[in-house]
Amino acid sequence: MLAQWNTISRFVRVSGRTITILVSVIAVLALGIYEKPALAGASRDRLDAFFKTVKTMRAEYQLTVLDPKKKVTQNAGGTFLMERPNKFRWDYNSPYEQVIVSDGAKIWVYDKDLEQVTVKKLDEALGNTPALLLAGSRSLDSSFKIVEINSSDDGLAWVELIPTAESDSAFSSLRLGFGPKSVEAMELVDSFGQTTKMKFKHVETNVSLAAQQFQFTPPAGVDVVGDQ
């Protein structure tokens, strides 16, 4: 998966590895599949309710990346849109203006300052990841070991998703923190020990989102690299 994103990674100033992680995670969130779980608790109930009932999502986010020694290496913020299945949009407002759009078939990465657009087919970009497996016939439990986290100080209901050995995943664990209605936080550890933390605010779910928000037309005069 990471090799398949090398082209994109060279042209984005928000870390290419961070983008790989985000695409994989948000593709998981943007899936439309749901099966009743074998085990259930308060945190698991919220996870399953999110996958079962939330069809669209709009939020602002703040992202922090820490290296294996827990030193902050990157901060970013902006807005996020999601529509199931497989459509999402990230607008980075800081530190650089960038846009990542999935229309369900392709992923577009646009760097305004560099005047560069990189495009990749969605299935090729994701490769054999849990996201792609979930988009097929497998349930959430088929691709992840799901563990409820029973205590937290932030008032959120947390679950941890650990990819199964069969999954070709860019991350080793993913924690999702749920409020009463939707996901409000994510914490992800990749295979190199890097941690990505994300907090969502002003979250709206099942709102009407215009179709053109998940479409992307490269501005005139920019360089376009990849699968057009």
Image (cartoon, rainbow, N blue to C red):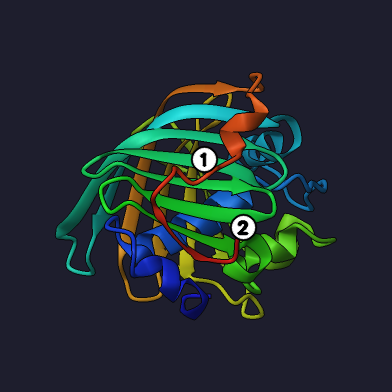
Q: Secondary structure at mark 2?
A: strand
Q: Position of residue 165 (x, y in %)?
A: 62, 80
- Residue drawn at x 55%, y 65% as measured from the top left: 162
Q: Is residue 127 left or right of residue 24?
A: right
Q: Nearer the viewer, residue 4 or 132?
A: 4
Image-based side of 143 in relation to 108, left or right? right
Q: Is 13 on the left-hand or right-hand side of 1? A: left
Q: Which mark is drawn over residue 89?
A: 1
User: Dot 1, how many residues are within 10 Å of its Cα: few (below 14), some (14-19), or many (20+)?
Assistant: many
Neighbourhood count class around disc 2 (C-alpha, 10 Å): few under 14, some 14–19, many 20 upward? many
Pinpoint residue 217: horizontal percent, then vertical percent. Answer: 54, 43
What's the residue at 55%, 49% (across, down)? 26
Quadrant of the rendered image containing residue 131 = bottom right
Residue located beneath label 2 in the image: 146
Q: Which mark is residue 48?
A: none
Marks 1/2: CA distance?
Answer: 26 Å
Is residue 62 or residue 98 the one in the foreground?
Answer: 98
* Any part of residue 217 in sight: yes
Residue 61 location, x and y as percent?
A: 37, 34
Q: Quadrant of the C terminus?
A: bottom right
Q: Residue at x 29, y 41 (%)?
A: 97
The amino acid beneath tag 2 is Ile
Farthest residue to the left: give it.
71
Please provide percent x and percent y for residue 62.
31, 37
Left/right placement of residue 200 relative to residue 33 reads left
User: Hey, what amino acid is under mark 1?
Assistant: Arg
Q: Which is more toward the observer, 156 or 219?
A: 219
Nearer the N terminus, badge 1 or badge 2?
Answer: 1
User: In this picture, is 71 found above or below 35?
Assistant: below
Disc 1 to disc 2: CB gap under 8 Å: no
- Nearer to the camera, 135 or 173: 135
